[in-house]
Image: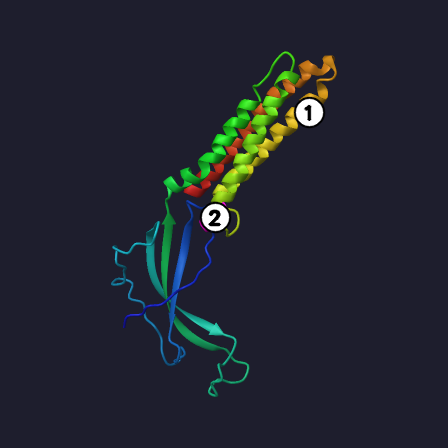
Amino acid sequence: MKVSGTFRQEFDLSEYPFDKQDVKIRIEDSEYDSSQFTYVADNEESGYDHAISLGGFKIRDFGVGVVTHAYQTSFGDPRIAHGKDSRYSQFVIDLRLERDDLAGFIRQAWPAYVAFLISFVSYWIWAADFITVLGARFGILGASLFSVVVSMRAASLTGTSFGVTLVDQIHLATLLYTLVGVGCTSYILYRWADPEKRASARRTNTIVAVSTTAVFLIANAISIGLAVT
């Protein structure tokens, strides 16, 4: 027989748009329990139509099997003793889906990386009198924060609002990186009032710039690498 239906399954989108999904389609007879009817999987002759389009997903693996599922009820069947389970045979189609949407990733992540570069540049805006460039530095960081928030909002409208995705992680990391830049600039302004502390403030600026940039790049590489592999 041919069976058609709508199947629902919750996806783990923490690695979106490089997520991998294990989809299980379970077929079960609604009338006969496992004592009356049992499926037998034909592993050698089972397959799928390779012309099927799954909207951005590729089928990486396919398999079939049979399991017996127990329900904690008799469904009103008088043949089943009170308090006993009712068991039904299930034919299970197991699909391994993989999404490889590099273009979609670039489209959603590039604003965050642009904001990161803008924030990085702000660390190197310096002058003998730091107060003269203070406004420009805060202005750049403010623009970076605004662009990250807008980009994060736009990415959340793509229908991937199930948990924190890879794109969300990149935006949050960029937001944190920019906030550290704001904190560093505020710290320098605080120290600048004392001429003897200006040299140490300049060193602090360099240390924060190099260390936070390295952490940001390494964390991004690890996150993307884990999602792709």
**Where in the figure is residue 68, as x and y percent of width and height?**
42, 71
Q: Is residue 192 above or below residue 107?
A: above
Q: Where the N terminus falls, by quadrant?
A: bottom left
Residue range highlighted in magenta: 156-160
Q: Which residue is mark 1?
A: 187
Label 1 amino acid? Tyr
Q: Residue at x 54, y 25 (%)?
A: 120
| Left-right relation of 227 to 198 | left
**Where in the figure is residue 71, as x and y percent of width and height?**
49, 74
For label 2, count other residues whose C-alpha is less than 10 Å away and answer few (under 14), some (14-19) or many (20+).
few
Q: Which residue is mark 2?
A: 157
* Residue sticking out furthest to the bottom: 78
Of callouts 1 and 2, the N-terminal one:
2
**How is the structure coloured here?**
rainbow
* Secondary element at tag 2: helix
Camera-side residue of 105 and 38: 105
Rendering quarter of residue 44: bottom left
In the rendering, which numbered label is found on residue 51?
none
